Image (cartoon, rainbow, N blue to C red):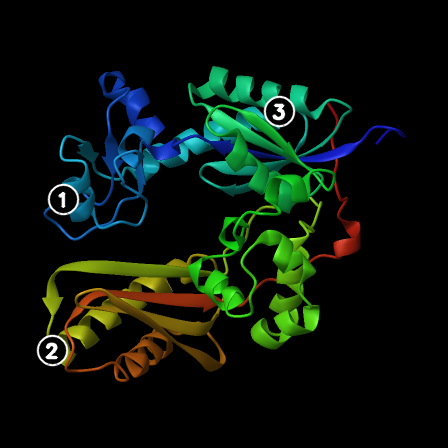
Amino acid sequence: MNAGVTPWVLHVDLDQFIAAVEVLRRPELAGLPVIVGGRGDPTERAVVSTASYEARALGVGSGMPLRLAARKAPDAVILPVDAPAYTAASEQVMEALRGLGVVVEVLGWDEAFLGVATDDPEAVAQHAREVVLDATGLHASVGIGDNKVRAKIATGFGKPRGVFRLTRHNWFEVMGERPTIDLWGVGSKVSKRLAGHGIATVRELADAEEAVLVGEFGPRMGVWYSQLGRGLGSAVVDDTPWVARGHSRETTYQHNLTTAEQVREAVAELASQAFDDTRREGRPVVRVTLKVRYAPFFTQTRAHKLPQPTSERAVVVAAALQLADTLDPEREVRLLGVRAEMQMPPEGDPAERTPIRGRL
C-alpha cells in the first residue's frame, strides 16, 4: 500500500436481492409488490424470505408468516423460493466485484465487504455499483467506512441505489440520537435489556459505563456493545473462504405434530439429514441443537455438547432424541429443526493476514 493512500472498508449490499432476481427473470413484475417465500402458496405454513420495496410499503417484511403477508398485500405476486437461482446470481455478483482487483469478503448471497486503498472512496463505490449492474442487471447500495461496523451501517443510509460514508468524524452526528436497535448486531431483545439500564440511544450506549454492560452481557459481549456504541470495530477485510460451523435441517409442518412419537420420528429424520451434511465436510460433530416451535408461535432451542467429537450417525441422532425427550408432550408442534455443529479446522496464524489489501 502506498504511503498517503487511505484504507477504506466498503460494504456492498444488493437491493431487494431475491425479489430483484425474480424481477429480472419476469420483467413484467417490475413495480409490482412481489413476495418470495416457501413454495409460493400462502395457504401453507411458510415465512417470507424477501419482499420487494412495493410489498414492504404495504407492511410485508422478511420472516413474516406468508399467510399474514398475503393479507397485508392481497394483490402481491407470491413466488416460491428458488435457491439455485439466487446462488448463481450471487456468484456472478462476487465475481464482478473481484474483477475490481480488491479484497472481497463474502458475507452471504447479497452482501460483501471490500478492502480498498484510495483517496476517493465514493468513486470506487460508484464503480462497484456499475460493474455489478453491468454484469448482472442488479442494483446495489454501498456503505463507506473506516471499519466494518460503520461501513455496514452506512449502507442503510445509502439504500436504495446509493452511497453513504460513515466514519469516526460523523458517527455521533448521524447515529448519536438513533435508538440502539439501529446498530448492527443489536436486536429487540438486546435493546430492551439496554433500556432496562436507561440506555435508549447510541450516544447513551457510548457513554455507558463498561462495567454496567459487562454485568448485563458478560465480559466478551459487554465490551463489544460498549465499543459498538462508539462505532468501533475491525477494519480487517479477509477473503479467506468461509468455513461452516455446522449444518441445520428445519421443517415447518403443514399439520401440527400432536404426539411424542411423531416428534421423535421427525427429530430423528432431521438429525440424520443434518449429519449427512456434516459428513460431506469430513469434520466430526461436537454439539447438537434442537429448535422447536410450539403452536401457535412460541419458539425454544435446547443444545447438548457431546462428550467427545463424533463421526457416528447414531450418536448424533441419539443426542437429538435426548433433547426431544425434554419437550412438553402436551403441546402441539408446528416446527422442528436440528443443528449439528462441527469441530472447526485449525486456524492459520492471524498475524499472516493483511488488514486491508488491494488498490484502485
**2 or 1: mark nearer the eye:** 1
Mark 2 or mark 1: name the one nearer the start of the chain. Answer: 1
Given residues 261 and 170, the one toward you in this image is 170
Count neighbours of disc 3 (C-alpha within 10 A) and say few if under 14, some if 14 to 19, many if 20 or more. Answer: many
Q: Which mark is residue 125?
A: 3
Mark 1 or mark 3: name the one nearer the start of the chain. Answer: 1
Does residue 299 appear left or right of residue 192 in this picture? left
Query: Which element is circle 3 on?
Result: helix
Residue 281 in the image, given as x and y percentages of width and height? 47, 57
Tell me the residue that label 2 is attached to.
259
Q: Can the viewer see residue 114?
A: yes
Q: Which mark is residue 194?
A: none
Residue 130 in the image, given as x and y percentages of width and height? 54, 17
Given residues 70 and 264, the one toward you in this image is 70
Amino acid type, mark 1 = Pro
Distance from the alpha carbon under mark 3 to that under mark 2: 55 Å
Query: Which element is circle 1 on?
Result: loop
Count neighbours of disc 2 (C-alpha within 10 A) and say few if under 14, some if 14 to 19, many if 20 or more. Answer: few
Does residue 285 appear left or right of residue 103 in this picture? left
Q: Do residues under tags 3 and 2 come within 8 Å of each other at their CB atoms?
A: no
Mark 3 or mark 2: name the one nearer the start of the chain. Answer: 3
Amino acid type, mark 3 = Ala
Residue at 48% x, 18% y is 133
Tell me the residue that label 1 is attached to.
42
Query: Which element is circle 2 on?
Result: loop
Given residues 201 and 241, the one toward you in this image is 201
